[in-house]
Image (tube, rainbow, N blue to C red):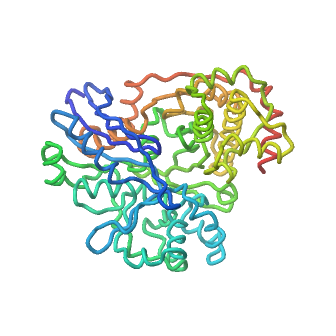
Amino acid sequence: MSLSSRFLTIDYGAESGRALLGEIHDGRLQLSEVHRFPNEPQRILGSFNWDTVRLFADAKVGIRKASGHLDGIGVDTWGVDFALLDSRDNLVGLPVHYRDHRTDTMLHEAFSRVPREDIYAATGIQFMQINTLYQLLALRLGQPEQLDRAKSLLFTPDLINYWLTGEKANEFTIASTSQCHNPQIGDWARDILARLDLPVSLFQPIRQPGELLGRLHPAVQRDTGAGDIPVYLPATHDTGSAVAAVPAEGKSGWAYISCGTWSLVGVETTAPVITPQSLEYNLTNEGGVFGTTRLLRNVMGLWLLQECRRGWEREGTRYEYTQLSQMSEGAPAFAAAIDPDDDRFLNPHDMSDAIRAYCFETGQKPPESPAAITRCIIESLAMKYRWVIERLERVTGDLFDTIHVIGGGSQNKTLCQAAADASGRRVLAGPIEATAAGNVLVQAIGAGRLESLAAGREMIRLSFPMEEYLPRDSASWESHYQKFAARIG
């Protein structure tokens, strides 16, 4: 590829956001950070809210700092959260964080109205109380006036895109996370929404990754000094962008772990897998790019360690993540294990206490020191990864001998080696900036600068190093894994 291209990706994570410039030249991609900013949700009168206006302001700062010609801009964020707009397109209330406690009882409430099996058959989505469906049900039951005032629903990246361009749409990959979308018919799950008394009229036309959404609004051009720049739809769900950048060769034999605050453990399929067995394993079918489906399961991920680290800092000691990983290697192996997806870990007051309570209640000696707690988290995550991959193999009938670990968690060497040891599979780690790379990749395809997803993944392989981890201690993991699997069911 001789043509040079420059695309800006604005990537919002649960803790921070970045604007990165992606420059493609001679078949390689180079990423450079132009703006980094905190994402600081606020507790307001008992509600846990996103500061979306601040996040939009930082998007404009990123655009302003990306000097020079841009061939496109693409936005991605976390999934499930949304904003409601009224008839004048003003916010109806403040967008609420998925970890807010308003959904604590909503799974039970939903199942009392619509059987669990019906919801899964229509949506193919993993049951998690954070899903958009249960957030909307919480509004219907607790703040119905908001739903009555609302005329539009925009998921978080859709809202940022609307403020950038003036164009409303629900992008496919982010819509697919909501449990309000039917992947088998490619439309909203109208029957399920009606049975829960939720207005389907709020949802927007569904647009596909790679499409041109619009161009920077004149007001944004004035605020940023930028020109008439096209705004493309990448996979606006950050995991969708990350999976687009998996540097795999071929279409089979590999699984992925998009590893960060959450760990998304999955495989890429050509169609949704919605069966009694996938329901039993609580697997999810999220939209991928260019005709693919992300068959996966959400695992709680490095949130566990992030929250412990915050707690230790409140107590007066700040640890770096690399320091914690090194400390953990000196702690006793397999002293205790947790199910990372136990509900108590979603948003506890103190994560270390929650981990100790789980261990005590399951007849294990609770870990006390930061090193022991970190080792417990890493070993538990690695075993849960294996547990999910084995179930993905059962429902697809395929075998996955390589695991691609992508995202920020791919830097955690201790976790990557543990994943290889626990699973007995080869692990390839990288790229670290998978979400940004996938965002740029899809923009480039939409702009006609790359031919296909396969060509994009070849570009990723050429552009970013990968580190290989081979199983080296699988035998000692086996008996502990069997106990772990029996405990979590």
Residue drawn at (70%, 21%), measured in percent from left and top? 329
The relative height of residue 327 versus residue 77 in the rendered view (above or below) is above
Is residue 254 among the parts visible in the rendering? yes
Give the percent coordinates (x, y) of residue 92. 37, 69
Q: Residue at x 36, y 30 (%)?
A: 459
Question: How many callouts does the rendering have?
Answer: 0
Q: Residue furthest right?
A: 363
- Spot occupied by residue 190 in the image (x, y as percentages of width and height): 47, 75
The reply, left or right, for residue 103 in relation to residue 223 is: right
> In the image, residue 70 lies at what x, y percent?
19, 38
Of 383 and 225, the residue lying toward us: 225
Q: 449 or 335: which is nearer to us?
A: 335
Q: Is residue 29 visible?
A: no
Q: Quadrant of the N terminus?
A: top left
Determine whether 41 is above or below 3 in the image: below
- Answer with the quarter of the image where residue 278 lies: bottom right
Q: Nearer the viewer, residue 465 or 155?
A: 155
Q: Is residue 66 left or right of residue 401?
A: left
Q: Which quarter of the picture shows residue 21?
A: top left
**Residue 66 at what x, y percent from top left?**
22, 35
Q: Indicate whether 52 appears above or below 12.
A: below
> Which residue does the image show at 59% across and 22% down from the upper left?
323
